[in-house]
Amino acid sequence: MTQPQKADEKPRFFRDEDESVINLNESRSLFVQDEADDSDDGQGHVESSSEVSSNTSNHKERFFESLKEILGENMISSSQLHTLWSSYGLLKDGISIAADKFFEDKELLSKSKTESKMPAGDNIEVIDLSDEENDDELSILPSSSQLSQLFTNKRTSTQAGLESPMSSDKGRNRWSRYIGSIHTMGFATRPTVKPVPIGSRLGFKKSVPKDLPLGKSLQHQHCSHLVRLIDTSQDRELGRMPEDVARILYPLLDYSEQVSLEPYLLINNGKRFSVGDNIYIRIDCYLTSQAFVRIEGGSILNKSFINDHGMDTRQLHRAGAIMALFDAINIQPVYGDTKNEMIPNYQENTVSSSQFQDEALNINQLKSFYRITQSAASLQNLPETTPDESLFKLQLRRYQKQSLSWMLKREYEYSHLSEKAAEVSIDGNSMNPLWKKFRWPSNSKQGTPNHEDDCFFYANLYTGEFSIEKPVIKTIINGGILADEMGLGKTISALALICTASYDEAHEKKIESTKKPSMKEMSSQVDSSPLRHSQHKHDTYAYRTTLIVVPMSLLNQWQSEFEKANKDLKKRCEIYYGNNIKDLRAYVLGPNAPSVIITTYGIIQSEYGRTSTSGLFNVVFFRIILDEGHTIRNRSTRTSKAVIALRSSRKWILTGTPIINRLDDLFSLVQFLNLEPWSHINYWKRYVSVPFEKGNYAQAFDVINAVLEPVLLRRTKNMKDVDGKPLVSLPPKEVIVEKLQLSSSEKRVYQSMLEDAENSVKEGLAKGDLLKNYTNILVHILRLRQVCCHLDLLKKTPDLGDPDLEDLENSTQNISSILMPKNIKSPKSSISQDKLDALSANFRDIHSASEQLPSFECAICTTECIEPLSAVSITECLHTFCEPCLAEYIEFQQNKKLSINCPYCRMPISEANVLKLKEPIDAERGYELISFHSHFQSTKIKALLRHLKQIQETSPGEQIIVFSQFSSFLDILEIELRSHLPRDQVIIYKFDGRLDMKERTRILEQFHDKDLSCIKLLLLSLKTGGVGLNLTCASRAFMMDPWWSPGMEDQAIDRIHRIGQQQTVKVVRFIIDNSVEEKMLRIQERKRMLGDIVEGDEAERRQKRIEEIQMLFQ
Amino acid sequence: MAALPKRIIKETERLVSDPVPGITAEPHEDNLRYFQVTIEGPQQSPYENGVFQLELFLPDDYPMEAPKVRFLTKIYHPNIDRLGRICLDVLKNNWSPALQIRTVLLSVQALLASPNPNDPLANDVAEEWIKHEDTAIAKAKEWTKLYAKPTQDEEPAKE
């Protein structure tokens, strides 16, 4: 146990180790005299041993204490102490030998310390010195290796001129506090006349070489010759410091006012120093009040020391030195916050396979990011605010009321908050992540009172700044990120905010107050625009208008949601799209300013950079809300730049997925919110991107957490509310993968195209230029996918909506060879167009064109009127059959290897030459015949029809969504479904990127209206309709084709599986068995495992794709 | 058993509602694919005044596959063997799904009117038909009188 009377003298040496001392009490009970001899050696610090007792434990304790005092408590572990004790405790001069030994091994020790960042006591290995047990050498000379090193240092020390003596003038500082000591062994460069007394206060002197400008990196320079140890009493150089210590000291000497270094001599062996002798010193390090002065003025975060190059080099230099010093004195940050424990060890979590170790987040990291952000604003603590019933029509869910409180608080709209809500602070208590908390080491010498609240200080090891107060991040921005998971009603929350606080009340008051006096002043004058007279800087402030930026497809949805929610008739919502408002500036600044203006990212982007005096950029809005805010995640895009350039006094981002792929996705959001200082790219890079790239995930997440905690609110569907109920209980979701077999003719096409594709992959792999042919292969794959959907897709030029082909535009020529089929080898019609025309004419003759609705018989099923007309198949001999009947017949004959003749007239026919009717373009011309395979019904369409017919029978009135990524496939679907389904029972809508705004609205409205008598079918392009839309009126969906990334499909399914859905959601995904689609499913699985990497940079994205391609052709 | 295709139902209905002169076809109560058929011998043929019993069965693949038709009544005919099997192209290679029960039975009736000994099934009958047509026809008439009488239960019912 510590001895109280000694605690005054050397208090900092008593902390750990107590236990071990007791444990080892029994060992080594003899050799008391030796210890007594030690004391005769003249070492002041062990004088107490003269009170010799037979108590060995005392003896040993003393040995430990002395050693600890020499070496510093933090520097030596108990195990080391015991090793040293067992080796030298019994020797004469044991302590000095032990110290010597310790220093000799220090390098090794410090190495192990930095490698495994564990508390000092545990990681320092026990030094086995048993073979030196009988070493009688008493002199404290460096080992030969050390000597040679010293001489090297000596040689390199050039004739640098000495500069101002290092002052440790404490008088100027108001106070200074001990933070730790460095124990080191320098070497004498000048002999002394007599022994320097132990405990002498020494000093440092810095010499600046002329060829080294101040502040320049010392990376490749030696420092040992630049730091001189001097005897302050005589102002005379004593010696030098070893290189590692000198490197730490050198830069610090420039900041002596903030960090004071006080070296003391520890051992002199009672001799004078000769050149080359070891000088054991302890450098006590103090932080002075000067170090803390900088931040007392205000928030350090707002200091503009970030220039284009990040911190200036001098600052960097100093910060590095302080960091090194802290490392050397082994002062460890105290983690009071539990937050750090929540960050798992990312190093272990990272996927080991090298190809996925890139900037993209893997799924685990993404999960932990969300875990962090979720914990930020605990649901338990957030009070609820119910919006005023006179303003807001809808009922909010509890968590939405919480988000309303939170949002109002973030806007400092306390007057709208419930009383209870106003009390709770949401600013959080989170410390700036760059700062670390440290405990002041106890040091009685300074006599500073050790109050509980006074025993910590804070340091920013990145900038080298210090603070006494906890550097809590205070967010000064108005706004934030509402990142609730998809389907939790972010829109509603935002609308509640708008309805509750629709204009800048403070500003209006200000105007009122300026207006009144101005009215008085110019009482005679009629002043039509009082705004003019308010402060000049405000004359562009549209303080009554909230701008909502949304993807185009959501434009009308937002408007209708607003109409649904808003009860205050004075509030209006206008869409700003397609030049409908001529002078926006005048409008929103005028007396009839609308409460809400909704516009699209596209509009903003197109107005950006345009010189205009009346557009979006000429106004400061009251509030901006970005819906689907991840749209701006790529900061290099024009849209992002444009959005960030918008001005408003409050800014909000709504997004369910703040991170799509990379941590850097957040940067644009931060930049938009103007979250100083993180919105500076250099700052962001330095503290987030770079640590993350280096694998220092904990740090990067730490920073992000602290940046976002105050401004981000995220809840997930799985979270429980205050009562422990799940936030949202959605009906179950069934996703069924239905595997389909291609028909024989489709299979033939597929096979032939597969062969082509395989050949070119093989070729590419063999030649090693798979990358070069990358685009070709993509086209091959695209083609294969299209065959799985519909053969007709082969004939169309590739869908521009397909991202696979986005990068193909440059190499169009290359592709066209593949695009243009050669590939549709089978079932190639042998009927020429001329012949077709002739047949058509004959056909029209037979079935008189005058007949309005010709009916066609099928001889096979004996139907007299084949319905619908698309089901009519016609042989070359112009006999009509139902398509399925004829197909069945042909297949039957083929299987039995029988000749295929027209069932009617026995004329030989062939499958390829079967004809179809094409509905007349104009009634006068009558029907035209086209060859069958241009009217090919695909396996998937057949399957879809089967399902639809079933639904039609079991539950008419159902609303159904059909997703595809190929809008040309949607076209085909539209035609085929129309002709196969009775028109009075099935209504088909198509929604894709080619529609303009009005049509989109109209279609969605019509689709939304329930009609029990008929099925409503919405053909939805995955890309256009995959995000944002609310289609909960439908409970069934069909995914016609798989997408590369599973997230996209999930998003699409979430259109119907979201709040408001009452029924079980049934989704059928059609996948062609044994095809490229099945392999895509596997790739999707893999992506789900690893997290999606879509964006990446071009090269890496391609590399990934090549792997996928290989997977596809395995 | 698979559900009865629409076509079979339609054909059956039509056979009943709009019968072919001289031919009857009634589905069996238990198996609607099995028909009991009677064909009257065509006039001016050796089979005149005879009423021949046949059975007709529609296989699963009907109408892709031809119906199976067999004479139950003994008949002396070069294209019909002792077991009643019929050699008729439309029942074999020349079947087309556009044909129906009705057309098949008409073809059978036509076969009775014009036997084709050059494509025989009953070789002995065909030989006789070629060598001594008169005796063959006489024999056919005799067999018709002997075997193809209107059935006892049917005829009285009609009268």
Image (cartoon, coloured by chain):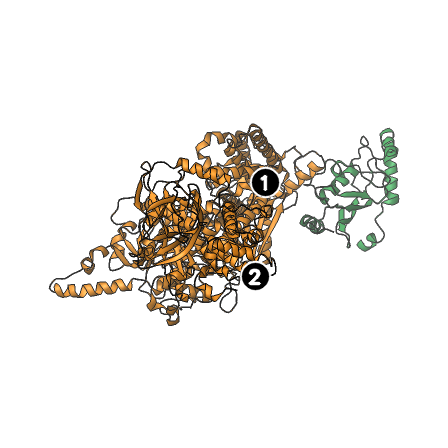
Chain colours: A orange, B green
Q: Which mark is residue A1004?
A: none
First reached walking from the N terminus: tag 2 or tag 1: 2
Q: Is residue A805 visible?
A: no
Q: Is residue B119 above or below residue A124?
A: above
Amino acid type at image mark 2: Ser
Q: Is residue A122 visible?
A: yes
Q: Quadrant of residue A432?
A: bottom left
Q: Of helix, strand and loop, which one carries label 1?
A: helix
Amino acid type at image mark 1: Val
Judge left or right: residue A989 versus residue A596.
right
Q: Chain of mark 1?
A: A
What is the residue that sits farthest to the top in this orientation?
A: A767
Mark in the foreground, 2 or 1 = 2
Q: Which mark is residue A57?
A: 2
- Towards the viewer: A739 or A777: A777
- At 85% across and 29% down in the image, what residue appears? B130
- At 34% across and 67% down in the image, what residue appears? A414
Q: Of helix, strand and loop, which one carries label 2?
A: helix
Q: Is there CB contact under 8 Å for labels 2 and 1?
A: no
C-alpha gap between disc 2 and disc 1: 79 Å
Q: Which mark is residue A1076?
A: 1
Query: Where does residue A1101 sit, x and y in percent of width and height?
Result: 49, 39
Judge left or right: residue B14 versus residue A128.
right
Query: Where does residue A359 sit, x and y in percent of width and height?
Result: 47, 44
Query: Where does residue A152 sit, x and y in percent of width and height?
Result: 44, 36
